[in-house]
Image (tube, rainbow, N blue to C red):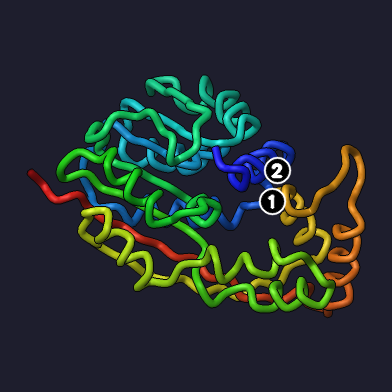
């Protein structure tokens, strides 16, 4: 794994205990992604960046998946996923792999569907990652992606700049967000046919403590918190969130980018 991916995966492992509650909006987004996939039968599914398993769960609930392979670079996330298997997927053959997207050992052309929810923006080379995921699809197979959309989180980005957060924070948005035309181009490079690509923009009013708890779950690798404590950067950000909040909490826009594509039939 690359050093960037490794540090991010370590951070997600640290935040795995509180992850599901912190990202409940992402879980709702995953449900919408799966409901947007074309009707059909998808007995074999690959979930890349599977996390604690909520996107896989939505896929099983809608399509009655028979075999599911979950790939994630975070051992902590996979452990949480594994703990749910007996209760949530008793009739599904499930295999979880601790692998990076670019080093996946899954065979090419072996899945009816590939899903990737709120993970693509953490992959250093997004074009290559989509191409690697696309290779895993059978002819006629479908890919569904949910990722951070370009143009959102300006209030958050500006707050980070005010507290002199390192460039790993402030440059993140330009480097990792995707717009509709960008991800459509990525899909075509991968040899896929875009079916539906769209952006969802929401305005959120969030309690600053809840926003900070979410940040500690999804960006622990950037905060640099020591075991059982908080870094000076963490405390600066926390204070700034409270200063920027009003009666309605911390107000910010967030963009989610959805993409559904198909591998051409042979």
Q: Position of residue 19 (x, y in %)?
A: 67, 44
> Which quarter of the figure has residue 70?
top left
- Location of the N terminus (image quadrant): top right
Q: Which marked residue is nearer to the observer: mark 2 or mark 1?
A: 2
Q: Position of residue 145 (x, y in %)?
A: 40, 54
Question: From the viewer's perspective, is 22 left or right of 41?
Answer: right
Q: Which residue is mark 1?
A: 22
Between 97 and 128, the one lying in front of the other is: 128
User: Residue at point 44% right, 20% down?
Assistant: 90
Q: Is residue 84 above or below residue 151?
A: above
User: Residue at point 28% right, 64% down?
Assistant: 196
User: Residue at point 88% right, 42% down?
Assistant: 226
User: Residue at point 33% right, 61% down?
Assistant: 186
Q: Which residue is mark 2?
A: 11
At label 2, counting other C-alpha atoms closer than 10 Å, the crowd grade (few under 14, some 14-19, many 20 or more) is: many
Q: Is residue 126 above or below residue 86?
A: below
Mark 2 near mark 1, Cβ–Cβ under 8 Å? no
Q: Which mark is residue 106?
A: none
């Amino acid at each position: 794994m690359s050093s960037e991916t490794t540090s991010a995966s370590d951070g997600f492992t640290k935040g795995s205990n509180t992850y599901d509650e912190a990202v409940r909006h992402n879980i709702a987004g995953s449900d919408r992604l799966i409901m947007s996939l074309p009707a059909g039968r998808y007995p074999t599914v690959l979930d890349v960046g599977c996390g604690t398993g909520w996107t896989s769960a939505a896929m099983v609930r809608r399509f009655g998946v028979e075999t599911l392979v979950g790939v994630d670079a975070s051992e902590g996330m996979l452990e949480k996923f594994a703990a749910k298997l007996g209760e949530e997927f008793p009739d599904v053959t499930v295999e979880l792999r601790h692998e990076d997207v670019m080093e996946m050992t899954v065979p090419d052309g072996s899945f009816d569907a590939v899903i990737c929810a709120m993970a693509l923006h953490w992959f250093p080379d997004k074009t290559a990652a989509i191409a690697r995921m696309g290779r895993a699809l059978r002819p006629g197979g479908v890919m569904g992606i949910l990722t951070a959309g370009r143009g959102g989180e300006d209030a958050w980005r500006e707050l980070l700049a005010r507290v002199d957060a390192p460039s790993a924070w402030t440059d993140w948005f330009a480097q990792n967000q995707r717009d509709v035309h960008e991800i459509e181009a990525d899909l075509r490079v991968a040899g896929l046919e875009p079916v539906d690509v769209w952006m969802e923009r929401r305005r959120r009013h969030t309690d600053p403590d809840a926003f900070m708890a979410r940040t500690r779950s999804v960006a622990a690798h950037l905060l640099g918190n020591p075991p059982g404590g908080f870094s000076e950067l963490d405390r600066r950000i926390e204070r700034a969130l409270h200063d920027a909040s009003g009666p309605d909490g911390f107000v910010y826009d967030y963009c989610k980018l959805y993409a559904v594509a198909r591998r051409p039939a042979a």
